[in-house]
Image (spheres, rainbow, N blue to C red):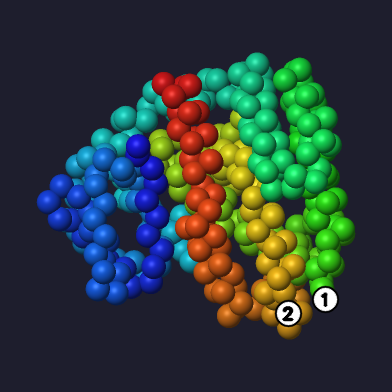
Amino acid sequence: MKRPIVVASYGAEVSKRANRLLVSVNGRNKPVPLGVIELLILFPGVSITSSAIRFLSHHNRPVIFVNGFGKVVSVSLPEHFGSSTVNLRAAQYRLFPEEAFANALIRELLLKKCNQLKEVIPDISEKITEVEEKIPVADTLNTLLGLDGTLGKLMYGYYSQKDLGEFSFKSREYYPPPDPVNAVLSLAFSYFYNLITANVIGSGFDPYMGFFHRRRGTHASLASDVIEIVRPKIANFVFELFETKIFKKEDFEQTIRGITLREDKLKFLLLLLTEFQRKKKVLNTANSFIKKLKEKLV
């Protein structure tokens, strides 16, 4: 099954060998068959040969370059990639504004989010089930937004009771983050939002046209929609970091954008998030939703 391939190891080289890619890291070579590649995402410090780019382009696979925080900085699209996505985007522009179609997608998304919440916080399963039972009959955007808000309150309410040592968490705030826990939550969500944006682009969607979150500025609304499915797992990982006392108060600083991590600890967090994704395959659930969404439209 095709999937996004992420190469994040600093110093890695991606080259072409016969009818496959070869990822070389510290003298170790890992072949990657073309058949499993949906798109290729490369982090800073990873190089790719021109023959590998041509090979991927010939087989209609995009190459997406991201910065250290996963934000898309450049995209190498196959020659005919745009023409192959015309029908998909036309359907996206036509169907996403339709209330019935959009609400059906939102219900599906929220049900998946409920499953994720019950998996990571079994202690509140009964309360999640109460919300879950209301989702299939919710028929307006405002009602669905309200149910999503209730899920958020249940999740963060649970975490607000956790013993985080020298840190505390009362509620989710992010414009700007007023405390270290909210700061790391925002950074973690941004990391995965950026990677989901890369996959949305690579799959041929317009990332700025969502069905749940409304378009605003340069925000990729569709990526914001999809991340809701995996938000519980990401939040749970962040709170586990604080429970295990990974961070100290001196790791954070006050800036005009609120509380944030110092540069050296920010790099450390990126390593932790990359390893978390590698081990837990957080994006698999999001990528599966994107793939099924594409099948609904074309």
Quarter of the C terminus within the rendering: top left
Q: Is residue 80 above or below residue 49?
A: above
Q: Residue at x 51, y 63 (%)?
A: 275
Residue at 54 percent across and 49 percent down: it is 282
Residue kind at label 1, given as amino acid type: Glu
- Where, by quadrant of the figure, is residue 118 drawn? top right
The answer to whether the residues at label 2 and label 1 have Cβ atoms under 8 Å apart is yes
Snapshot quadrant of residue 180? bottom right
Q: Is residue 75 visible?
A: no
The residue at the far bottom in this view is 250
Q: Position of residue 181 (x, y in %)?
A: 75, 65
- Identify residue type, mark 2: Lys
**Which SS class for mark 1?**
loop
Of the 4 image quadrants, the one containing the N terminus is top left
Judge whether residue 3 can be spotted in this image: yes
- Camera-nearest residue between 191 and 158: 158
Q: Is residue 25 left or right of residue 106?
A: left
Q: In terms of depth relative to the viewer, which is nearer, 116 or 169?
A: 116
Which mark, by number, is residue 166? 1
**What residue is shown with label 2?**
248
Looking at the image, residue 29 sits to the left or right of residue 122; the answer is left
Q: How many marks?
A: 2
Q: Is residue 206 depicted above or below 174 in this figure?
A: above
Residue at 46%, 55% in the rendered image: 72
Residue 38: x %, y % from top left: 34, 42
Disc number placed over residue 105 in the picture, else none: none
Image x and y of residue 279, in percent: 50, 57
- Horizontal and vertical percent position of residue 124: 81, 43
Nearest to N terminus: mark 2 or mark 1: 1
Q: Secondary structure at mark 2?
A: loop
